[in-house]
Image: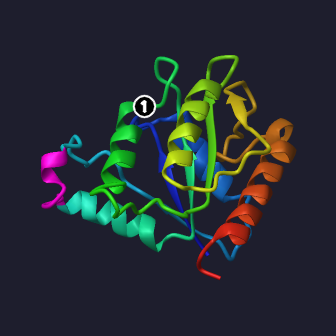
Amino acid sequence: MEIAIITGSLRAESYNRRLAKALTKLAPEDIDFKFVEIGDLPLYNQDDDDNQAASVRRLKSEISSADGVMFVTPEYNRSLPGVLKNAIDHASRPYGESAWAGKPAGVIGVSIGAIGTAIAQQNLRKILAYLDMPTLGQPEAFIQVKPGLFDDDGNIGPDSRKFLQGWVDRFIDWVREHSKAD
């Protein structure tokens, strides 16, 4: 089974990229993860729907070939980052040719703020519902960056491991239940 991972941050030392990498280590060995690049996409313009850039075609192909999608996003100004929305818009177009439709999804994120990425995740969930992506509802995971979240090797630290292991396990089960690859 292949899971596409989309991180909503382009920053090299992104907490969300670190979280995504650490979460992959909690999954069973039969799961393949593909980190999907979104930083090379042009700004979405409907005029380009009939002649999509190579990076857009690659994005759509990677989403289409995946069994599920894990979104790991920061929160910018109480919403999802523009780069993530841009990627979502590109892969949903042209109308009727969405790569997202029917793909099971999970939403998680980490922030230095006390509420984690709660509002960004709720905004993202509304978009995914419109795109016909069955999205894992529970457990919700609004993670705050605190000392010990990651160990020195980039793994999830002991204080958060049980909860995040449970999230990963439930997400993998969700994808297996809802994937069209069966």
**Quadrant in the picture for the C terminus:** bottom right
From the viewer's side, name the closer residue of 85 and 1: 85
The residue at the far bottom in this view is 182
The answer to if 47 sits in the magenta stretch is yes
Up/down of 46 relative to 123, above or below: below
Q: What element carries label 1?
A: loop
Up/down of 158 relative to 169, above or below: above
Direction from residue 4 to residue 159 in the image, left or right: right
Q: For the point 56% across and 47% down, which residue is it? A: 129
Q: Looking at the picture, how far across and down is residue 116, in whole percent?
A: 66, 25
Up/down of 124 relative to 33, above or below: above
The residue stretch that appears in magenta: 46-53
The total number of labels drawn is 1
Tell me the quarter of the picture where residue 60 sits: bottom left
Tell me the quarter of the picture where residue 30 sits: bottom right
Q: Looking at the picture, how far across and down is residue 92, in whole percent?
A: 36, 54
Q: For the point 35% across and 37% down, which residue is it? A: 83
Amino acid at the residue labelled 1: Pro
From the viewer's side, name the closer residue of 163 and 92: 92
Q: Looking at the picture, how far across and down is residue 89, in whole percent?
A: 34, 46
Q: Mark 1 points at which residue?
A: 81
Q: For the point 52% across and 26% down, which residue is it? A: 75
Q: For the point 84% across and 41% down, which residue is it? A: 158
Direction from residue 92 to residue 152 in the image, left or right: right
**Quadrant in the picture for the N terminus:** bottom right
Q: What secondary structure is the stretch in magenta mostly built from?
A: loop
From the viewer's side, name the closer residue of 158 and 5: 5
The answer to if 91 sits in the magenta stretch is no
